[in-house]
Image (tube, helix red, strand yellow):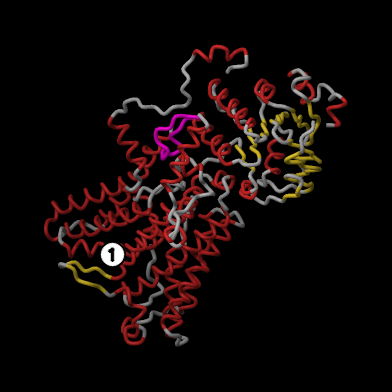
């Protein structure tokens, strides 16, 4: 593939006591692609993602963004570098409003003295932008942007989390099981949204157990097994059942896949 | 637009995605939603009803500017300590050491002036430093050592209280001495008369502090982060809120507010006594709970806390003027606490 890597990792290792969650794992995301990441439960996918975005500090290994070594110490560092993540648990604050959640950790203050001295938040501005972002992405029709997130259904909450990542991700977006809680229609919306972001040139990492979804949108599939990258396959050249066989260890990965 | 076999029929289906329901709600559900969005409404309603009730029951003796301002004077300390407690409880913590920090800081203000002869303003600053340090220790133990707030402050409550008795040698500094040598310490006992009402500077300080906190909690990023931390600390951390740092700041500010309460307490009782404010921690938690602030964190308003403190004040004075056994006050406050939590649970079912 003739595209430069955006995010790469080499030799990531993370141990929790005697459990090795990541064992010399490598990772490559290329410009403008959707990279699927699949793996069994406990293969270390979530730890890999957390290490990439600074939510977990790896014991060893190196992460590069645009060719430069980065050392994220928290998810907000990663966000500052333009990496947005939809975590599996969504990372939303239930009692706060949709608008508050979208801007949590990156609130805007009023211009002038009101903002600098009185620290007054620009609520109107944030609400306006939140509404615009949500409808631009076509994720949901919003009656009240000030509704607390806890009054939304599971699918709606997922919509808020996805919208937050899509709205603010400038370098890449990572989605950990973004369709897990969604119905057929809402899943479709999220998949279309991923294609939209890709067409805008934003690369995406999609972690999912849903093989049809992964095979539909992914350009390459990273198969994670026993804490490391086991193989990288092309979804156009491999069947779902073979991918699952490689993932579970029932089949050895093809030779060129190992090298990739 | 659909690309997978089982999705073929989707194009014909309803295209609205996750829209919000607009169905008619029953009046009870409407009330539930209204209360869910305005967190201080329930305690305010209870407060107005109880003032009206005692106004009818006791009459002019209760429903006068003087009596009502007396209630404010009596709840000033609880209100200020309650403000500190509100901050901590909003982060899903609890601070049992608030009263001990208040008294220890007060002792520092008094003893530094009278034992070491420091100028009163310097002593007051040292008292604030003492309160902030006590709060900071709580915050570090909670956020860095990851100990449960209940256990941490149960321990530091004893420690700060013992430090208070040891350092002060259990001696009270008399009101007359303070008045003669360091009147600044009694500043908050000063008052103004407005149409029969006596408003002390302590009451004004409480009101200003609560308004300030209400502004900070609702209109600044820091305030929103306090709620986010109490609501779901993991989500807050992943959203970029520095949770441990927030906790240290919250407990430190809580300590500072307690020190401030110590200064106001000198004005209220006149003297500097190591045995004052014994029940401040329980009273502040009572105010917070009756004020509709959730002990699980992330929900409630500091305005609710002040209404909660005033409800307790109204019941104490009202029942005393009505001439009942004072135990009825405690009995009714117990009922109020349980009622408040039950209502909180019911309102929270909106999130079902």
Residue at figure coordinates x 78%, y 19% from the top left? A238
Q: Residue A148 location, x and y as percent?
A: 43, 39
Q: Which residue is mark 1?
A: B74
The stretch drawn in magenta includes residue A151: yes
- At which x and y percent is residue B164? 47, 73
Indicate left or right for A86 with B262 as reference.
Answer: right
Left or right: where does residue B164 sit relative to residue A91? left
Q: From the viewer's perspective, is B51 left or right of A175?
A: left
Locate the N terminus of chain B by quadrant: top right
Q: Residue at x 44, y 54 (%)?
A: A110
Q: Considering only vertical position in the picture, is B178 above or below B54? A: below
Q: Main secondary structure of the magenta part?
A: loop
Q: Where residue B193 sits: x, y (%)?
A: 19, 71
Quadrant housing residue A250? top right
Residue B96 belongs to magenta span? no
Q: Residue at x 67, y 21 (%)?
A: A216
Q: Which residues are magenta?
A: A139-153
Q: Is the residue marked by circle 1 packed among few (<14), some (14-19), or many (20+) residues within 10 Å?
A: some
Where, quadrant-wise, is the C terminus of chain B in this rendering?
Answer: top left
Residue B335 visible (yes or no): no
Residue B151 in sight from this viewpoint? yes
**Secondary structure found at label 1:** helix
């Amino acid at each position: 593939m003739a595209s430069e890597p955006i995010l790469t990792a080499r030799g990531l290792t993370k141990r929790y006591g005697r459990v090795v969650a990541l064992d010399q794992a490598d990772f490559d995301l290329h410009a403008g692609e959707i990279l699927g990441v699949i793996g069994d439960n406990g293969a270390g996918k979530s730890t890999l993602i957390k290490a990439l975005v600074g939510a977990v500090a790896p014991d060893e290994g190196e992460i590069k963004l645009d060719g430069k070594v980065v050392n994220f110490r928290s998810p907000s560092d990663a966000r500052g570098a333009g990496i947005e993540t939809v975590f599996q648990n969504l990372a939303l604050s239930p009692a706060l409003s949709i608008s508050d959640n979208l801007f949590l950790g990156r609130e805007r203050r009023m211009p002038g003295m009101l903002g600098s001295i009185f620290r007054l938040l620009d609520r109107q501005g944030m609400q306006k932008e939140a509404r615009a972002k949500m409808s631009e992405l076509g994720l949901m029709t919003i009656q009240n942007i000030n509704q607390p997130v806890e009054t939304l259904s599971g699918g709606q909450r997922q919509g808020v989390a996805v919208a937050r990542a899509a709205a603010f991700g400038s370098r890449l977006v990572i989605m950990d099981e973004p369709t897990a809680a969604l119905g057929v229609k809402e899943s479709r919306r999220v998949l279309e949204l991923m294609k939209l972001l890709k067409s805008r040139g934003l690369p995406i990492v999609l972690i999912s157990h849903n093989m049809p979804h992964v095979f539909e949108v992914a350009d390459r599939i990273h198969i994670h097994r026993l804490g490391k990258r086991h193989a990288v396959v092309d979804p156009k050249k491999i069947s779902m059942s073979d991918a699952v066989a490689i993932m579970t260890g029932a089949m050895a990965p093809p030779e060129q896949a190992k090298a990739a | 637009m659909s690309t997978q076999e089982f999705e073929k029929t989707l194009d014909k289906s309803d295209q609205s995605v996750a829209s919000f329901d607009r169905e008619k709600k029953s009046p009870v559900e409407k009330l539930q939603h209204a209360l869910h969005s305005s967190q201080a409404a329930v305690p305010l309603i209870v407060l107005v009803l109880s003032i009206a009730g005692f106004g009818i029951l006791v009459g002019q003796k209760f429903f006068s500017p003087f009596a009502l301002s007396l209630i404010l004077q009596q709840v000033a300390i609880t209100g200020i300590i309650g403000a500190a407690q509100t901050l901590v409880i909003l982060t899903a913590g609890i601070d049992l050491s608030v009263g001990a920090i208040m008294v220890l800081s007060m002792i520092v203000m008094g003893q530094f002036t009278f034992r070491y002869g420091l100028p009163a303003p310097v002593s007051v600053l040292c008292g604030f430093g003492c309160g902030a340090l006590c709060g900071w220790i709580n915050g570090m133990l909670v956020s860095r050592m990851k100990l449960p707030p209940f256990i941490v402050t149960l321990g530091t409550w004893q420690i700060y209280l013992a430090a208070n008795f040891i350092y002060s040698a259990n001696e009270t500094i008399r009101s007359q001495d303070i008045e003669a040598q360091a009147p600044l310490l009694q500043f908050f006992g000063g008052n103004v008369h407005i149409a029969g009402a006596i408003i002390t500077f302590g009451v004004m300080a409480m009101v200003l502090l609560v308004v300030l906190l209400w502004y900070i909690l609702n209109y600044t990023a820091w305030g929103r982060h306090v709620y986010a931390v109490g609501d779901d600390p993991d989500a807050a951390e992943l959203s970029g809120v520095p949770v441990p740092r927030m906790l240290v700041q919250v407990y430190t500010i809580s300590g500072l507010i307690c020190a401030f309460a110590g200064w106001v307490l000198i004005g209220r009782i006149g003297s500097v006594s190591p045995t004052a404010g014994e029940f401040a921690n329980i009273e502040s938690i009572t105010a917070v709970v009756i004020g509709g602030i959730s002990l699980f964190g992330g929900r409630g308003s500091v305005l609710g806390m002040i209404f909660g403190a005033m409800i307790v004040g109204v019941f104490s004075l009202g029942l005393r003027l009505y001439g009942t056994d004072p135990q009825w006050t405690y009995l009714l406050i117990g009922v109020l606490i349980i009622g408040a939590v039950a209502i909180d649970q019911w309102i929270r079912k909106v999130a079902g």
